[in-house]
C-alpha cells in the first residue's frame, strides 16, 4: 500500500524499492511524499529541468502517455526498462489540474542528460517550450519540487548551468539542444524556483482580524486575499504591495497595482475568475 489515511490526512510510505512508479501527486502531496522516501546514502546533489516537446501539454493523456514514453525509451532508445527522467509536471488526466508524476523513483539514477545522470534528479515539464514559455502552474511545480529537494537533500536553489555542482541546471547548458525550449528563459525559471513558497499572511490570519477593522480596511484586507491568490498561482509577485496596504496606502492605488498584476497573470493563464 502506498499511502495511509489517518484523520483525513494522507501519510505516504517509502516506495524506493521500486524503480518505476507511474504515480501522480498533487502540489500538496509531493513534498509529503518525498519527505518519507529513502534516497540512499549517496543521493542526488544536482537537479535539471526540461520540456518534453512531444508529448506536449495538449497531447498528454495521463498515465497512458507516461507509459508510452517509457516504452519508447526502452524499445527505441535501448534504455533500461523504467529508467528515464524522474519527475513529470503534467495533469493526472487530460484537462485536469497540473501536478507531479513520479516516473523513475528519485532513489535511482535516471536518464536525461548525457554525462549528468549519476546522482541527478531530472524533471520534465510536459510542454512545448519552443513555442511558448512555461505558464504559472509549470513554474509553480518547479518551485515546489526544488523546495522539496532542498528540504530533503539540501540541493540548493542556485543555478549551476554548465558547471557541475550542487544546484539546478537546464538541459541546454550541457547539450546542443533548445531544452527547455527557445521561449523559456533560464533566468526566469531560476527566479521562479528561488521564490518563496508560503504566502506572507495566511487566509486564517486575515480572517481572524477582519472584524477588528473599519469598513475601508476590510476592503483592503479582501484585496490582500485576492493578491495572495494570484501570488499562489504565479509565485513571484511583489510582496511590498502587502506592506503598502498594511501601511494604509490609498485603496485606489493599491487596487490599480493589483489589477496590473492580475492582467499579467491572466494573460498567461485564464484561471483567475476575478470580478
Ligand atoms: Zn531535456
Image: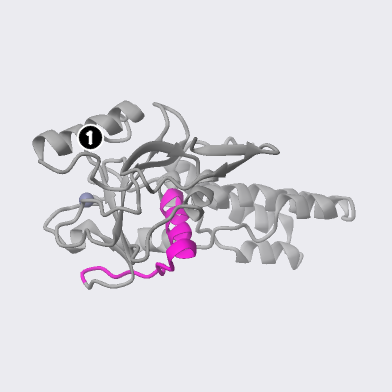
Q: Nearer the viewer, residue 264 or 48?
A: 48
Relative placement, left or right, of 261 versus 153 is right
Percent x, y for residue 251?
A: 73, 56
Question: In the image, what residue occupies the spot 80% across and 49% down?
Answer: 207
Answer yes or no: is residue 185 visible. Answer: no
Start-end of magenta stretch: 140-162
The question of residue 144 being in magenta is answered with yes
Q: Main secondary structure of the magenta part?
A: helix
Q: Where residue 157 sits in the image (x, y, percent)?
A: 41, 67
Q: How is the image coloured?
A: one colour
Q: Tell which of 250 and 24 is nearer to you.
A: 24
58 relative to 162, above or below: above
Q: Which residue is mark 1?
A: 69
Quarter occupied by the C terminus:
top right
> What residue appears at the point 45 percent right and 52 percent down from the top-left corner?
37
Horizontal side, residue 153 vs residue 32: left or right: left
Q: Position of residue 67 (x, y in %)?
A: 27, 31
* Label 1 Cα crowd, 10 Å radius (few <14 / some 14-19 / many 20+): some
Label tally: 1
Q: Is mark 1 within 8 Å of ligand 1?
A: no
Kind of element beneath mark 1: helix
Q: Residue at x 72, y 50 (%)?
A: 203
Q: Does the magenta-highlighted stretch encompass residue 66?
A: no
Residue 116 in view of the camera: yes
Image position, residue 156 (x, y; %): 41, 69
Foreground: 78 or 158?
78
Amino acid at each position: 500500500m502506498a499511502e495511509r489515511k489517518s484523520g483525513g490526512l494522507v501519510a505516504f510510505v517509502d516506495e524506493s524499492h521500486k524503480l518505476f512508479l507511474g504515480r501522480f501527486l498533487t502540489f500538496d502531496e509531493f513534498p509529503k511524499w518525498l519527505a518519507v522516501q529513502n534516497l540512499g546514502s549517496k543521493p542526488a546533489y544536482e537537479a535539471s529541468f526540461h520540456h518534453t516537446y512531444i508529448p506536449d501539454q495538449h497531447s498528454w493523456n495521463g498515465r497512458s502517455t507516461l507509459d508510452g514514453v517509457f516504452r519508447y525509451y526502452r524499445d527505441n532508445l535501448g534504455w533500461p526498462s523504467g529508467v528515464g527522467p524522474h519527475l513529470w509536471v503534467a495533469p493526472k488526466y487530460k484537462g485536469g489540474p497540473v501536478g507531479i508524476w513520479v516516473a523513475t523513483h528519485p532513489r535511482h539514477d535516471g536518464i536525461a542528460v548525457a554525462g549528468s545522470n549519476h546522482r541527478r534528479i531530472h524533471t520534465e515539464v510536459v510542454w512545448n517550450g519552443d513555442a511558448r514559455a512555461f505558464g504559472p502552474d509549470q513554474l509553480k511545480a518547479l518551485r515546489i519540487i526544488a523546495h522539496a529537494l532542498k528540504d530533503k537533500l539540501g540541493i540548493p536553489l542556485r543555478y549551476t548551468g554548465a558547471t557541475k555542482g550542487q544546484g539546478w541546471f537546464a538541459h541546454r547548458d550541457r547539450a546542443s539542444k533548445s531544452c527547455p525550449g527557445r521561449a523559456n528563459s533560464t533566468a526566469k525559471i531560476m527566479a521562479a524556483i528561488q521564490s518563496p513558497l508560503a504566502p506572507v499572511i495566511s487566509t486564517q490570519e486575515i480572517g481572524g482580524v477582519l472584524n477588528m477593522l473599519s469598513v475601508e480596511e476590510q476592503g483592503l484586507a479582501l484585496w490582500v486575499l485576492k493578491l495572495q491568490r494570484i501570488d499562489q498561482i504565479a509565485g513571484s509577485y511583489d510582496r511590498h504591495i502587502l506592506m503598502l496596504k498594511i501601511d494604509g496606502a490609498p485603496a485606489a492605488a493599491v487596487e490599480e497595482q493589483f489589477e496590473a498584476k492580475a492582467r499579467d497573470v491572466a494573460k498567461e493563464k485564464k484561471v483567475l475568475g476575478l470580478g
